[in-house]
Image (cartoon, helix red, strand yellow):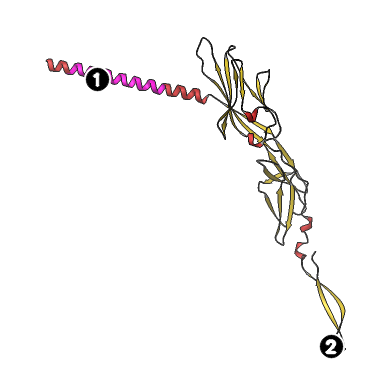
């Protein structure tokens, strides 16, 4: 009876220990879920800008007079570009003239360039009677050069014609082709740099449209009329020109030369 009683006590203790371990694991798991939810709640603000623009980063300060703000570059380099608070301010030497704090509560980055493209963060720490989490705002800044007007180059052959589209300026450029038939509205037909057209469509008009997130441009209308007579290119024209040739014995002989004309 005594041994049986000890076994029951040990069994009860083991069950309690097991339940305590499970509760501990569940608590840790719940904490992980909680922190994961908070982390995923931090959104990233996407900013598309043109070279030379001034960009405003909002700085939402919702605490008393005691706070510190840090403006950080996270990619492609990790560095603190500026910080201020407690009546002190600091700017990275390379950003001394380009970063300005506005009275409306925003940080201005002036004259942005292509190499300013990257990820940034603003951290706000409040200091007071209560402990508060750091407020983090993330930014994805993309700086683009506007696209220039595209140029179409036409190449003809006996089987088909090809149109190539090119631009002299612009970053992250995408393009597409539009055809304007003899009747009806124009429509989008291809997204490749080179458009190959079979014969029979020379009367239609074609344009190339280029774009990036901050600009777009359209080429002049082009037709393939100059490719209509391609099949006659480099054909012999039966035109005989008589020229005089003097032989070594003094005799005169007429020679005939066939000339090839390229259309």
**As rendered, which of 63 and 167 lies closer to the eye?**
63
2 or 1: tag closer to the N-terminus: 1
- Give the vertical position of 141 relative to 70 (above or below): below
Res 183 label: none
Q: Secondary structure under badge 2?
A: loop
Q: Position of residue 13 (x, y in %)?
A: 24, 17
Q: Position of residue 187 (x, y in %)?
A: 71, 44
Answer left or right for 7 relative to 138: left
**Residue contact at pointers 2 and 1, CB within 8 angstroms:** no
In the figure, residue 90 lies in which quadrant?
top right
Q: Position of residue 83 (x, y in %)?
A: 59, 22
Label 2 neighbour load within 10 Å: few <14, some 14-19, many 20+: few
- For the C terminus, the quadrant is bottom right
- Give the vertical position of 222 relative to 20 (above or below): below
How many discs appear? 2
- For the N terminus, the quadrant is top left
Answer left or right for 256 relative to 37: right
| Closer mark to the observer between disc 2 and disc 1 | 2
Q: Position of residue 217 (x, y in %)?
A: 74, 41
- Give the vertical position of 112 relative to 107 (above or below): below
Res 248 label: 2
In the figure, residue 197 lies in which quadrant?
bottom right
Residue 209 visible in the shown view: yes
Q: Residue furthest left?
A: 1
Segment colored magenta: 7-30
Name the dominant secondary structure of the magenta segment.
Answer: helix
Q: Residue furthest top?
A: 129
The question of residue 18 being in magenta is answered with yes
User: Which residue bears the numbered disc 1?
Assistant: 14
Q: Secondary structure under badge 1?
A: helix
């Amino acid at each position: 009876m005594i041994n049986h009683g000890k076994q029951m006590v040990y069994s009860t203790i083991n069950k309690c220990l097991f339940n305590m371990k499970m509760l501990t694991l569940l608590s840790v798991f719940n904490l992980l879920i909680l922190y994961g939810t908070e982390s995923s709640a931090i959104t990233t603000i996407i900013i598309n800008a043109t070279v030379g623009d001034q960009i405003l980063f909002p700085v939402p300060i919702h605490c008393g007079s005691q706070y510190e703000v840090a403006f950080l570059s996270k990619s492609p380099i990790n560095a603190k570009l500026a910080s201020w608070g407690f009546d002190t301010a600091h700017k990275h030497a390379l950003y001394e003239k380009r970063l300005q704090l506005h009275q409306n509560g925003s940080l201005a980055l002036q004259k942005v360039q292509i190499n300013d493209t990257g990820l940034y963060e603003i951290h706000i720490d409040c200091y007071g009677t209560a402990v508060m989490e750091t407020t983090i705002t993330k930014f994805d800044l993309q700086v683009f050069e506007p696209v220039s007007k595209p140029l179409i180059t036409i190449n003809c052959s006996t089987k088909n014609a090809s149109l190539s589209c090119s631009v002299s300026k612009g970053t992250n450029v995408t393009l597409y082709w539009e055809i304007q038939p003899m009747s009806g509205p124009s429509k989008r037909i291809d997204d490749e740099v080179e458009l190959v057209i079979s014969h029979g469509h020379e009367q239609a008009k074609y344009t190339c449209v280029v774009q990036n997130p901050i600009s777009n441009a359209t080429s002049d209308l082009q037709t393939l009329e100059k490719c209509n007579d391609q099949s006659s290119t480099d054909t012999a024209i039966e035109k005989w020109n008589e020229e005089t040739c003097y032989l070594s014995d003094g005799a005169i002989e007429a020679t005939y030369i066939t000339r090839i004309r390229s259309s």
